[in-house]
Image: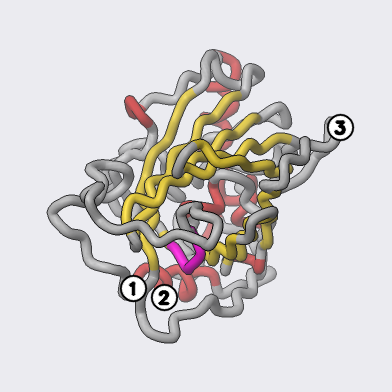
Amino acid sequence: MKLRFFGLLYLAALLSPLPSLTSAQTVGGGTQPPETASIPRTMDGKPDLSGIWQVLNRANDNILAHTASEGVPAGLGVVVGDEIPYRPEALLRKEDNFANRGTRDTEANCYLPGVPRITYMPFPFQIIQLPDVTTFLYEYVHATRYVYTNGSEHPDGPINWWMGDSRGHWDGDTLVVDVVHFTDQTWLDRAGNFHSENLHVVERYTLVDADHISYEVTIEDPDVFTRPWTMRMTLYRRTEPNFQLLEYDCYAFEWEQYYPYPGL
């Protein structure tokens, strides 16, 4: 059996201190921080997203609202309306995914988790913002993602990439990222919610004050869903002195004996 230390690292991520919630904030995409707060800007006047960020929700377990079960704390949903519009045949596959999640989930195999899932993995990530490209550095499996904001178009496809191809532009103070060219092997969470290689993702990053980003992502995949649908959540800046991304090594193994959290 191949071993890995996912459980201890997962615990460390959850137990690491995060900025405290104020009365103007809720977990998972509720009320946003006050709009009157100052917004840092770059030299060209764009909101400055640079920094280290992390979610404070249970979306990686299940993007829908869920009660507690063995090893899985209860969580608020991040899907608007708390419903995913599956096609009937796709819903059957989702249920089969859930039944076989211990070995079928890409996270269990240490693969890249895809977009948008990597955003709400329980690990921090760093944004480095430049005029022509915004770089995302993820602690999880050392993933790197480039969002080109130089006006370039997606390359011709189809191309099967774990993280897709990301092209961005600014809509006022919101960074809008269009992502296509996916593999069908990634999931949206541990509950088996999935997509096809025809997934189209549109992300919206809005800096609402110096330490909070309103993150909205619209999912479109006519092969799996009957209509587009949206998730919303808040990203929190890690403000601790000298906070940095750590090395993360993932060792895949079969989850059955450790489900739902290997190593716990």
The label on residue 15 is: 1
Residue in the image at 34% along x and 62% along y? 211
Prevailing secondary structure of the magenta residues = strand
| Kind of residue sitting beneath label 2 | Ala
Q: Earlier in the sequence, mark 1 or mark 3?
A: 1
**Magenta residue span:** 49-53
The structure residue drawn at horizontal position 35% and vertical position 57%, both measured from the top left corner, is 39
Question: In this view of the protein, which residue sits in the foreground, 63 or 134?
Answer: 134
CB-based contact (under 8 Å), mark 2 and mark 1: yes
Q: Is residue 51 left or right of residue 135?
A: left
Q: Position of residue 234 (x, y in %)?
A: 35, 50
* Mark whose residue sits in front, 1 or 3: 3
Q: Nearer the viewer, residue 155 or 89?
A: 155
* Relative to 236, residue 1 above or below: below
Residue 135 place in picture, x, y as percent: 64, 60
Task: Tell me: residue 112, above or below residue 263.
Answer: above
Asked whether 78 or 90 is in front, the reply is 78
> In the rendered image, which residue does mark 2 sit on?
12
Q: Which residue ends up furthest to the left in the rendered image?
A: 23
Q: Residue at x 51, y 64 (%)?
A: 50
For the residues labelled 3 and 2, say whether their Cβ atoms are less than 8 Å apart.
no
Q: Is tag 3's residue or tag 2's residue first in the polypeptide sequence?
A: 2
Is residue 99 visible to us here? no
Decide whether residue 50 is among the magenta residues. yes
Give the label, 3 or 2, closer to the camera: 3
Q: Dot 2 lies on which element?
A: helix
Give the residue number, with chain letter if any, for mark 3: 156
Q: CA distance from mark 2 to mark 1?
A: 5 Å
Q: Secondary structure at mark 3?
A: loop
Residue 92 sits inside the magenta stretch: no
> What amino acid does circle 1 point to?
Leu
Front position in the image: 122 or 200: 200
